[in-house]
Image (spheres, rainbow, N blue to C red):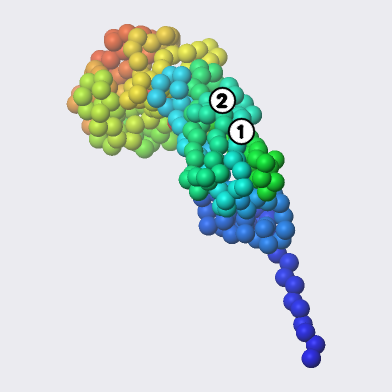
Amino acid sequence: MKKIILIFIIFVSCSEFQYQNLCDPKSDQFTKGLILFKILGESRYKCNSFDIDISSSVFEITPNLGVLSESGSSLSVGSSQIFVIRLFKAPTANVTIQIVSSQPSLATLSTNSLTFPQETWSSPLSFTATGINDSIINGDRNFNLKLKIDSTDEEFHDLSFDIPMVLKDNERRLFLSTSPYRGGEFGGIGGADLICNSDIKCPAGSSCKAMILGPTRIASATANLGDGQVDWVLHPFAHYYSPSPANTLITTTNQTSLLQIPFASVIDAVGIGGWLGSSSGYVLGGNTCFNWTENTAITTGFMFRTQYTDNTLFGGNFSCSNQVNLICVEF
């Protein structure tokens, strides 16, 4: 009897099947992709901008890529991520892992070396990567954490692994909308967001929202505390810049995502202000042109006076029939 041998060849393309999330390490399809590449005898899983070593069956790193943000615990320290390393089999000697960042200026490491003792090899080890917060508009940046394993056990010796990383920028633009609007003609908070997002001053590739208060957008329930926030548009420990003059620092935010007064410079030296809805402390006030739906002269709305840098920023109270700009922020 003749034996029939069937050979199946499977091709996996991340670009062709992007909708299946083959390139998203959090996806089940990503795990299946790794398995298929191993079945095919591939030593590396190539996917878009990152390239993962899958040749090793003796250790595991979780997660196998990282995302950090410059927004973290201060204006110099960003967010952190913990990476856990496990060995799958007992080594015949100690296993040491060296950890190096390809861009040391982007993140700090809790340690540059981990050692698995031969006797306690099954206990996982971990390290932490922490983003560095700067004050430069430089966009999101990619880098790698490079891990190299050394041991007299030949099965572990000279193995390497790269962890793809992204550090997300937290420098943002803050500006007045190009056109002014009466208090109720921009369509409430949702309409204000659409206007800011389509404004020519909104940086290309970014989304922008309106810094305006209402029942569905709360900045602070208590003056200047940033408590009880709902759909707030500012980020913690961020630097906010004016696009004109080019990249002029206006001010920073604190841990509760409130602009810190006094400002370093005015939001706009020409415009009288922007609709806000607060008379002090970023607390929602009663003068909001009936939740930004009213244009009559007998109703009023609180403005943010953009020609000031101290607490007189608050308190401008204009008739809703007047045309006033929106305050837009890069989100």
Q: Residue at label 1? A: 98
Task: In the displayed orientation, state which residue is furthest to the bottom.
Answer: 1
Task: In the displayed orientation, state which residue is furthest to the right.
Answer: 2
Q: Residues within 10 Å of mark 2 (few under 14, many from 20)?
A: many
Q: Residue at label 2? A: 106
Depth order, front residue of 185/159: 159
N-term-proximal mark, 2 vs 1: 1
Q: Quadrant of the N terminus?
A: bottom right
Q: Is residue 41 visible?
A: yes
Taking the spot 60% from the left edge, 37% from the top edge, the residue there is: 96
| Residue 236 picture location, percent across and down | 39, 25
| Residue 181 picture location, percent across and down | 37, 26
- Seen in the picture, residue 288 relative to 308 is either above or below; the reply is below
Depth order, front residue of 310/41: 41
- Seen in the picture, residue 208 relative to 312 is either above or below; the reply is below
Q: Residues within 10 Å of mark 1 (few under 14, many from 20)?
A: some
- Which one is closest to the eye, mark 2 or mark 1? 1
Asked which secondary structure carries label 1, the reply is: strand
Taking the spot 58% from the left edge, 22% from the top edge, the residue there is: 105
Q: Is residue 274 visible?
A: no
- Seen in the picture, residue 312 relative to 127 is either above or below; the reply is above
Depth order, front residue of 118/310: 118
Taking the spot 53% from the left edge, 25% from the top edge, the residue there is: 108
Taking the spot 24% from the left edge, 17% from the top edge, the residue there is: 280
Asked which secondary structure carries label 2, the reply is: loop
Q: Quadrant of the C terminus?
A: top left
Q: State left or right for residue 269 relative to residue 262.
A: right
Mark 2: which amino acid?
Leu
Mark 1: which amino acid?
Gln
The image quadrant of residue 150 is top right
| Residue 13 picture location, percent across and down | 68, 55
Q: State left or right for residue 221 relative to residue 20.
A: left
